[in-house]
Image (cartoon, rainbow, N blue to C red):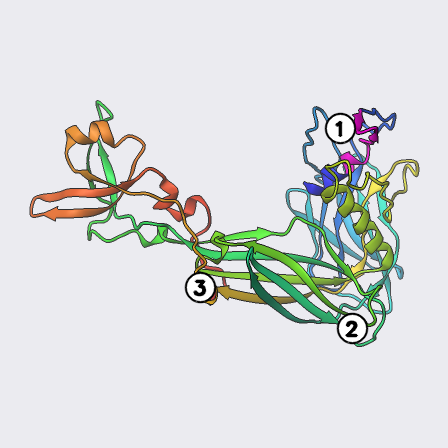
Amino acid sequence: MRLIKSIACLFLLGFFATSCKIEYHPSLKSPSSGYLVVEGFINSDGPTSITLSRTIKIYNDSVVDNREHNALVNIEAQSNESYPMYETADGIYTSSSLQLNSNEKYRLHIKTSNGKEYVSDFTNYRTTPDIDSLSWQRNADGVKIYINTHDDQDQTGYYNWKYEETWEFHAAYYSSLEFVVDPISHFVIGVKFKNADKSIDSSLHTCWKNVVSSNIIIGSSEMLSSNHIYFPIMSIRSADEKLGVLYTINLRQYAISKEAFSYLQKLKKNTEEIGSIFAAQPSQLSGNIHCTTDPSEMAIGFVEVSQEKQKRLFISNQQVPLWNYNDGCAEYLLQNDPTELQTKAGGLFPTVPFQVTPVGIGSFFATPDNNCMDCTFRGSNVKPSFWP
């Protein structure tokens, strides 16, 4: 979505004079179907995933993402070998795991459902150095995570990084109860145990949340004395839920060309550094995707062949004492009495009993937020395969 917004920003040029912003309406016209946007890279040692979408005209400063469906997508070698890609999700095209020839050049070939064809430039196979380490430091604002990498060839390195975050979190309260509702009046008239053995529903207590990076992270050793990079990847603010129990980040590193670095640098400025009178103004993006059926039509994207290198880092709550995460949940004590429940149970969710007598549940706790007793509203209760 960020990339789509950035493309739209390219056509909203403004200028400033004597501290006044003057609205400017560009005369550029995009095709009715929008420009094709290509995101991703050709993975030389594994499956390739490419996202296709279309730019959308801006109305009232809003942009709608429009994925490109039913396209024919292939990875092509200069020697005429071809590897098909298939739409496996919304506008996302994926290949099988590939082992590409390091001495060969490759490109992407796209034929859209309207018959237009697009190709990327043939590019060389790029070898990505290993990630030496991932580390973190705690500061007054929270935790900052760093990458440490170098290239033994000691050549100027240009890098693109992406990451996937996963963290475990817990519901504030266990749950073993549910309301009993009168079928005629629809009033709550009591509570009962969900399970016959009166056990808690443990499946609602522990969950995991997964987030993929959406910002552009690039780095270069061009201005350094050696191709050795120590670079901040991301930050976690103090008291954030991410470090409430256990957190992990899986970082992916790609070696890219100077041309790709320049393209991503412009894209980063257009998407992340615009918004004030002192920010850089939108610049024209010049990628390596071309429309062969209509050379005058612009396409957006930069596709290269690169290896993917990964490294994972775990940080536990015990490693950050006094983290002070607060889930903001509250619980109330209610009597299991129909008269009281008719007036007090509305908008509440029962958790566990407080008092159980020989004749049943005498009183119980309830919370006004179902997120506080059911973690599946905010994440998945399926434990990831890589979780310790």
Mark 2 or 3, nearer chain start: 2
Q: Was residue 14 drawn as part of the magenta stretch in this picture?
A: yes
Q: Are marks 2 and 3 in contact (CB under 8 Å)?
A: no
Q: Is residue 217 found left or right of 35 in the rendered image?
A: left
Q: Are marks 1 and 2 in contact (CB under 8 Å)?
A: no
Task: Name the disc covering residue 321, or none.
Answer: 3
- Mark 1 crowd level (few <14, some 14–19, many ≥20, 10 Å Cα): some
Q: Is residue 212 found left or right of 170 in the rendered image?
A: right
Q: Is residue 354 visible?
A: yes
Q: Secondary structure at mark 2?
A: loop
Residue at position x 45%, y 62% in the image: 317
- Give the residue type at disc 1: Lys
Distance from disc 1 to disc 2, alpha carbons, whole Å, reads: 43 Å
Residue toward you, 177 or 27: 27
- Mark 3 crowd level (few <14, some 14–19, many ≥20, 10 Å Cα): few
Measuring from the top left, give residue 169's x and y in whole percent: 43, 54
Residue toward you, 322 or 211: 322
Span highlighted in magenta in the image: 7-22
- Residue identified by numbered label 2: 151
Distance from disc 2 to disc 3, alpha carbons, whole Å, reads: 36 Å
- Residue identified by numbered label 1: 57
Disc 1 or disc 2, which is closer to the eye? 2
Disc 1 or disc 3, which is closer to the eye? 3
Measuring from the top left, give residue 289's x and y in whole percent: 85, 46
Q: Quadrant of the N terminus?
A: top right
- Give the residue type at disc 2: Asp
Q: Secondary structure at mark 1?
A: loop
